[in-house]
Amino acid sequence: MENELIQILPAGSNRSERQLQPLAPAHEILFNDAATKQPFFKGKTFYIETFGCQMNVHDSEKVAGTLLAKGYRPVENYEDADLVLYNTCSIREKAAQKVFSRLGAFKKGARNRQRIIGVLGCVAQQEGERFFDRAPQVQLVCGSASYSRISELIDRLEAGEKRVTGLSLDTDECFETEITRRDNPFRAYITIIEGCDKACTYCVVPMTRGPERSRPSDKVLAEARRLVDAGYTEIQLLGQTVNSYRDPSLARLAFPELLLRIAEIPGLKRLRFTTSHPHDFTSEIVRAIENSPVLCNHIHLPLQCGSNRMLARMRRTYTREEYLEKISCIRSAKRAMSISTDIIVGFCGETEEDFEQTLSLIDAVGYDQVFSFKYSPRPNTDAGRMEDSVPEEEKGRRLITLQERQRQIQLSRNQELIGQEFEVLVEGFQSKLGQAIGRTTSNRIINFAGEAGWIGQYMNVRVTAAGPNSLVGVRAESG
Ligand code: SAH
Ligand code: SF4
Ligand code: F3S
């Protein structure tokens, strides 16, 4: 299944990579203030390619908006661009390498036009000034905490400066833009919390995205209203630890209150949020979902590992038992919820017994989806200084074992849905098969005979067959 971007996904799989499409339909530009403004193109062009999680995807939408406001026009091919930007991900070694292979296209001699090449995001922040030594063709290095300076940095390059950086993490600002170029016609993202204050020993994010900063609730609510006014029926709130949200405004809305306030906006059909950290996951969040049908019945709750010994070494701040308590709270909700997770196999010192604990936990929970990764040591992390003791081959074996076990779990969970009816949002159409691709609020995909014209509509579908990754259905008469 091509399960697109439902969580804070690390890069490394095609699924998590998006290349922003050139500007076309009107829904792709959303002006954050006066709806009357139109971009004025001055003839300069830009290309932006994004790796990594949805937070990066949405940052790129905002950077693209900032460039539109400057009079730049988007192009589909980097060769046609005056400004080429790569928004990078550093979550694992393979992800971090991607930008260097892209930059190979601009080695000396290969350059056939004057252009500015910039790197943004987590590798940019991690490498800093060193980036210029590794890739002399790069002129701009800017991390996500400095995007509010991106316009000024480009101005300085246009004025003749050779190299500019935005690398400060010392900011309590969130990246607010006048224009956001949204490239998903169904789901609009809103980042409500930037950075991360947790300190998981394997993870680069606190170093690459800086300390936690929450966005004032009035700004979040105003943006949500504008999005609904512009025709979006689904909103996804983003944050590396979205449920650690702490409203800096006087309203002091707690996260579940913020969810309910957004869900009340007339016209909004679906509200999602990701990623929740188990430590800050409360029963109030479950109550909020129970109380509002707009809140989607899907929770992404990364586990990472089922063994307490490993969880402590990862510094995840919860035990297997505490995690399972959160799961039973979710399972006791009045509405059935789907649960997905992230798991790392082969972390430093992970024994076969530790791994067995992960397997027994996935059996106990019965996840609807699992994103699993081989542990990859990262620079400047505490785990990076520990012994990476599990051989690569063994990591691979554990990954396959885990994925196979989860495939069986998903298959049997999905088969239980045969005969049931669900509302889906039609997000795509496969013309070869004549099939519409719908998504349920629980984030399942149902394929059913349909028409291209149904894209964007909500309709009821009855499940007729089930595989591990998707369902097949027919449009229900009631829908
Ligand atoms: N903030 C989220 C995770 C963001 S990164 C959370 O706390 O759950 C997305 C996923 O990438 C993580 O959940 C983890 O499973 C994986 N990941 C992070 N660092 C990794 C590393 N060094 N090696 C392998 N996988 C990693
Ligand atoms: Fe990384 Fe942990 Fe923060 Fe998630 S909570 S971004 S895994 S440090
Ligand atoms: Fe990657 Fe940075 Fe996101 S490391 S997963 S792009 S926060």
Image: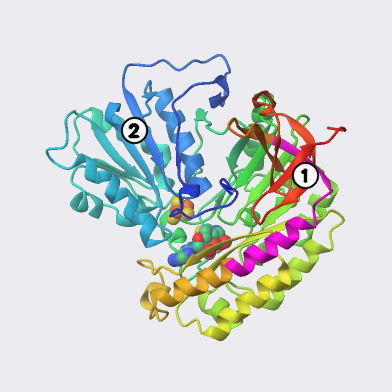
- Residue 387 lies left or right of residue 453; in this view the side is left
Rendered location of residue 466, percent (x, y)? 72, 52
Relative to 108, is 330 on the left or the right?
A: right
Sequence-wise first label, 1 or 2: 2
Q: Is mark 1 within 8 Å of ligand 1?
A: no
Between 407 and 166, the one lying in front of the other is 407
Residue 306 location (% of width, % of height): 62, 76
Is residue 350 within the magenta segment?
A: no
Q: Position of residue 341 (x, y in %)?
A: 62, 62
Residue underneath mark 1: 260
Q: Are marks 1 and 2 in contact (CB under 8 Å)?
A: no
Which residues, given as a range, are shown in magenta?
404-425
Which quadrant holds residue 207?
Answer: bottom left
Mark 2 within 8 Å of ligand 3, using the beta carbon: no
The residue most toward the left is: 109
Looking at the rendered image, the quarter that the C terminus falls into is top right
The amino acid type of the residue labelled 2 equals Glu
Foreground residue among 54 and 217 = 54
Question: Looking at the picture, does residue 385 appear above or below residue 328?
Answer: below
- Residue occupying image coordinates x 72% and y 73%: 364
Q: Which residue is mark 2?
A: 152
Give the residue drawn at x 17%, y 34%. 111
Residue at screen point 57% across, 76% down: 311
Name the quadrant containing residue 432.
Answer: top right
Of 340 and 64, nearer the camera is 340
Crowd tier of the residue under label 2, counting other residues whose Cα lies within 10 Å: few below 14, some 14–19, many 20 or above:
few
Q: Secondary structure at mark 1?
A: helix
